[in-house]
Image (tube, rainbow, N blue to C red):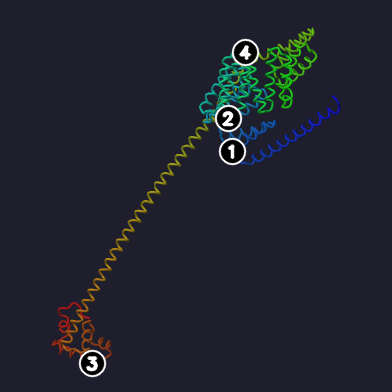
Amino acid sequence: MTLKSIKLFIIPLFFFFIQAEAQKNKNKINIDSLYNELKDKLNSTEKVDDLIYLYKKSSRTKNIRTDILNEALEIAKEIIYIKGIGVCYNRKGITARYEQDYAQSVIYHKRALSFFEQTTDTFSKAKCLTNLAVTYRKLNLEKEAFDSYFKALKLAEQINNKKGITISLNGMGNVFLNTEQYDKALHYLKKALTIETELENPRGQEYGLANVGEVFLFKKEYDSAYYYFNKSLLLSLKNPRKESTAIKYNFFGLLYQKKKEYAKSINFYQKAIPDFEKYKNNRYLSNSLINIGINQLELKQFKKAKNNIQLGLEKAIQVKSKENSTLGYKALTDYYKLTKDYKNALITQQYATVYHDSIVNEASQKNIISTQVAYETYKKDEEIQDLAKSKKISDEKAKSNYWRFIYSVLFSVVIIAGLLYLIVLLRKNSDLEIQQKNTELQNYLLYIDELERKSADNTKIEKQELSHKFDEYELSKRQIEVLKHISNGLNNTEIAEKMFVSNNTIKTHISNIYTKLDVKNRVQAIKKITSNHRFFL
């Protein structure tokens, strides 16, 4: 390789590294900023959910912030947010699995499950069971894994969560694949693939096709394996996603290795390596390198074989992959045997046996691990139960207060409605009374008018009669006026004052009145004038 070509290779790589680091720092700053904002908010279910979301975001950027998750858990416990506690423990279980602390992962997932069971969140419960099953598989606890997948499947079916159903079916199929029950594996994996096809989900179909192809590969039905691997590869090429295409190349590499077409096998493994390196998937990378070495041993390319096997073995040990480490040491043993270096062959054989035994021991210790998990979970049971009881009491109290409030509101509404109805009745009654009084008043006024009219008519008649009487007795106007004052009860002095004359003049008028009426006193005079009449004005 020339200096120029080296520069052309290194410079873009350098800039890619700088850009990646810059993006990583930007993401870190963004997460720190959001975290600081959340710290100032009051503790609530929304704050817990936001912290969990921020933790997930940090996981996606490969900058896992367990401090954020721990704070979310503490707040959830403080405010007795049951679902939040479950989600936090479930995430801690996933993190522990990534760190290969599988026993602790199971403990966290089972603890999460105990909280989810106190809620109505079927989706989260099913998801937690699936995570628990994955960890059980890492521990070679296939029975426990199958039971968890089966429970998750039932829950997913209850809420018709197609994605959850396919994940559970694929998990159950893989359990049977690991235990070499290939027909049962095909049953579940094909059911999952059918659902993904109905949903028109390319990613799910790609994964399902690869799983079915793997079963046929182990059954040594290579044509069927090729058919499913090829369909899966075409989907991954059409919808590229990280190292998904590289994984399909890896399957093809293994297929051709089983068919003893070693050159083709090497070609596919080599196609896979760039993406595994790009996305730092050292587990698959170690597997590809070791298998390339195995193929090269079959082709008698011993030097190349040794280099690839050793490189793959280093990466397998680095990521603590016992399966790949065992595969690497076995391949290295075969190399030393073929090159007649029996001393090193014995050493590598011993290493291969150690790794193989560690895997076997892991499987043989499943009862011990199950007991450990049960014990660790039991230690937390009392705390969980106390928390659950507190939550239940709190919920019942809240429910009781809620119904008490509802009843109070309803009672108040009834009372107010009754008062309003009474007010309406009183007002209606008042209006009726007013209307009645108005009617009575109108009738009274009409009666008064009638009386006045009759009075006016009677007065007119009486005046006419009195005038006729006065004419009959030939009384003068002044005598008639004096006679009216007498009828009103006035004495001589009062009459004199009203008429502005002397008392003697009044006495003279009265004397003349008596003479004309032929009476001796006032009473007789008035009686004579008003006889047979009601009014005298």
The residue that mark 2 highlights is 86
Tag 3 and tag 2, C-beta contact below 8 Å: no
Q: Secondary structure at mark 3?
A: helix
Mark 2 neighbour density, 10 Å: few (under 14) some (14–19) many (20 or more): many
The residue that mark 1 highlights is 46
- 104 sits left or right of 471 in the view: right
Q: Nearer the viewer, mark 3 or mark 1?
A: 1
Q: Secondary structure at mark 1?
A: helix
Amino acid identity at mark 1: Glu
The residue that mark 3 highlights is 505
Amino acid identity at mark 2: Gly
Q: Look at the image and tell me whether residue 371 can be seen.
A: no
Q: Earlier in the sequence, mark 2 or mark 4?
A: 2
Distance of label 1 from label 4 (alpha carbons): 51 Å
Residue at the farthest left position: 518
Q: Quadrant of residue 498?
A: bottom left
Q: Earlier in the sequence, mark 3 or mark 2?
A: 2
From the top left corner, tell me how far across and down residue 92 is, in percent: 63, 28
From the top left corner, tell me how far across and down residue 73 is, in percent: 61, 32
